[in-house]
Amino acid sequence: MNEKKELLVIMPAHNEEKNIRKVLEQLEKQKVLQIADILVIDDASSDATGQAAKEHECALISNIFWMGYGSSLQLGYRYAVKEQYKYVIQMDADGQHDVCNVPLLYRKLRERDADGRTPDIVLGSRFMEGSSEFRVIPLKRFAYAWFRLIIRALTGRKIADPTTGLQGLSRKAFFYYSEEGHFDDRYPDANMVIQMLLLNFRVVQLPAVMHARTEGQSMHRGMKEAWYMCRMFFDIPAIVFRIKGLKADAEVSDRLQ
């Protein structure tokens, strides 16, 4: 790899051979490598996902055993901490997150508000004015509405896309996520947004360009969708109790640098 940048793009990948080549090629064509380093976490794929990553200019971590989406992301955060990156952008390896979003998220991470503060987390949203058209089935539309309602009730914030996997993180945010017990090892979605809002991390939103998956299978399919909703149902109250009831990490946003 060339001289290290301050931005790291993290892509967890499990059996994404058909998609990841296209994503990495687009990152190269749109000159994202001029502003960012790329890290692919091959999560014990049974296809040639790892080999596809080796054909491009990126760092590669290959898990011997399947760890899951959340654990792979956390491994990426720990890599970013160890290598002293300042910013992280996480995106999917399946082609749903258009690479044109990377420079926009990076710019937003460095943008100061009226008080001179920069965001801790930037959420790339499918459902804001200015976002590309993205169709969802009625069941998922209901789930998104439910998550929006829960987030609004618990934090007072309106989050347009509570389950987006396209996110930009400051060092403070990914350092916190890198520590044991601070990140969901399977389904880090609306539960993590709620956690970070309750801990007073600065969360902003940005309209994003996203596409429907064309190859492979989503991690949310079949009975996994039911298990995912069940996990959220129990996980969100546990997070609220830990932060509000037990006062765990109540001052985390002030003490982390």
Image (spheres, grey):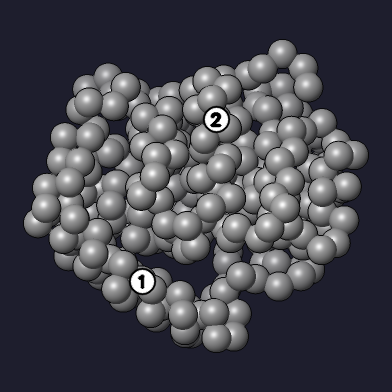
**For marks 1 and 2 on the same chain, the one whose residue lies earlier in the sequence:** 2
Residue located farthest toward the top when viewing the structure as drawn: 3
Residue drawn at point x = 41 percent, y = 78 percent: 229
Residue 42, given in percent of the width and then of the height, sits at: 72, 50
Can residue 1 be seen by looking at this rendering? yes
What residue sits 36% from the left and 49% below the top?
181
Q: Is residue 95 visible?
A: no
Residue 112, given in percent of the width and then of the height, sits at 34, 23
Q: Amino acid at mark 2?
A: Ala
Q: Secondary structure at mark 2?
A: helix
- In terms of image quadrants, where is residue 189? bottom left
Residue identified by numbered label 2: 80
Q: Position of residue 197 (x, y in %)?
A: 25, 48
Query: Residue at the location (60% across, 58% down)?
Result: 67
Q: Is residue 39 above or below residue 145?
A: above
Q: Quadrant of the C terminus?
A: top left
**Residue on which disc 1 sits:** 232
Does 192 sit left or right of 165 as displayed?
left
Q: In the image, residue 142 lies at what x, y percent? A: 39, 80
Label 1 and label 2: CA atoms lie apart by 27 Å
Residue 114 appears left or right of 46 = left
Task: Write the residue at 28% across / 52% down.
Answer: 195
Q: Which mark is residue 5?
A: none
Q: Quadrant of residue 117?
A: top left
Q: Which is nearer the eye, 119 or 77?
A: 77
- Label 1 sits on a secondary structure element that is helix
Quadrant (top left/top right/bottom left/bottom right) for the N terminus: top right
Of the pair 195 and 97, the residue shown nearer to us: 195
Horizontal side, residue 53 vs residue 129: left or right: right
Vertical placement of residue 256 versus 216, above or below: above
